Image (cartoon, helix red, strand yellow):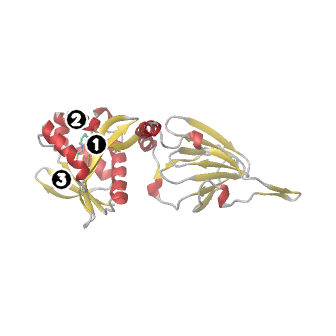
Amino acid sequence: MIIRIIFAILKILKMKGMDKASVFDCSVIDLGQISSDEGNITVLENDKFPFDVKRIFYLYDIKGGESRGAHAHIACHQFLIAASGSFAVHLDDGIYKREVFINRPNLGLHIPPGIWASEMNFSSGAICLVMASLLYSEDDYIRSYKDFRNYRHVTFVDYSKRFLEKSWFWLNDVEIKFLTNTPDFDRELQYKWFNSLANNPNYRVQGVCYEGREIGVLGLKNIDSIQKKGEYFGYIGERDYWSKGIGGRMLIHAQSLAKIEFGLETLYLNVIQGNDRAIKAYQKFGFSKVGQTGDLIRMEKRI
Ligand SMILES: CC(C)(COP(=O)(O)OP(=O)(O)OC[C@H]1O[C@@H](n2cnc3c(N)ncnc32)[C@H](O)[C@@H]1OP(=O)(O)O)[C@@H](O)C(=O)NCCC(=O)NCCS
């Protein structure tokens, strides 16, 4: 019983995106120092870090009062040290904000992934030493605050009967039905499709939530593990959430599902001619047109 309650709480937290790190998970760690009459030494060893260090870089020659950073990482942990001088770090988890001032070479700030961080008010001559848990990959960076908000607030959950019920209304909305090229269907057909999901290895569907509210659906179908190809589909059923960059977040998620869970190398999709919002979102994400049959445009992306 207790385990069930714990799982239910974890599920709610995951739906709301609250399973991600918060600003209160960012901690200042004292690395210690060995002092002598000649001066101090601080020793950095992996066991003093909350992660294994794969990369080190440092910022210097920064003009006094300048700011740097203003981005978040998806998977990379970082550890910041003011090797010389001082600076402030502004931390933001999408809900809470916090500012930490670092001004001693023996103190370091651990920033877990998923936190929007900016380094500000550098003292003149300051050196910011950064230890990172991953090698450089642009894919790990979230550089716009709009994308960051979506990263924090959009979550992907199991496709449950609640989504099935909502989909009934979403896909019977005349405009959405047209935009998604959905054929006529009835309740019986919908339930038949739902019940077939558990036994269909070529189909993977998930619900999309914003701060825990069900807003849409995404998935992969026609998954072909020999040709390493799969078809993406997705829609936001709640119109208030259109054109807020959530489509891009859905594509990032579908791409990692395709790569990690199914080992796919190509994603394709079909979009109805005239669905300019969708086409723009797909192009922005790197899909390009490879063909057209009637009104249906086929787009592809190597992932
Ligand atoms: C298609 C869909 C998933 C895209 O997600 P989204 O979050 O709305 O899209 P994004 O905000 O990531 O990107 C849309 C882009 O199109 C632009 N756009 C919005 N309306 C537009 C229009 N009528 N014409 C052209 N571009 C438009 C937006 O400005 C944005 O570009 P920008 O980031 O450069 O400003 C979503 O709109 C949706 O589900 N729509 C209804 C159903 C549907 O069309 N599904 C797709 C079936 S293939």
Task: Determine whether the residue tagged by mark 2 lies in a helix, strand or loop.
Answer: helix
What type is the residue that disc 2 sits on? Trp
For the image, the number of numbered tags is: 3
Q: Position of residue 92 (x, y in %)?
A: 54, 39
**Quarter where residue 195 is shown:** top left
Task: Determine whether the residue tagged by mark 1 lies in a helix, strand or loop.
Answer: strand
Q: Nearer the viewer, residue 103 or 93?
A: 93
Q: Are discs 1 and 2 less than 8 Å apart at CB?
A: yes
Q: Nearer the viewer, residue 41 or 221?
A: 221
Mark 1 and mark 3 lie on one chain; the one further toward the N terminus is: 1
In the image, is residue 46 above or below residue 238? below
Report how far apart the C-alphas of labels 3 and 2 lie in the structure: 22 Å
Residue annotated with mark 1: 217
Disc 1 packing (10 Å; few <14; some 14–19; many ≥20)? many
Q: For the view shown, which residue lies furthest in the right direction?
A: 37
Query: Which residue is located at x 67 percent, y 42 percent?
Result: 101
Numbered disc in front, either 1 or 3: 1
Residue annotated with mark 3: 297
Q: Position of residue 137 (x, y in %)?
A: 47, 59
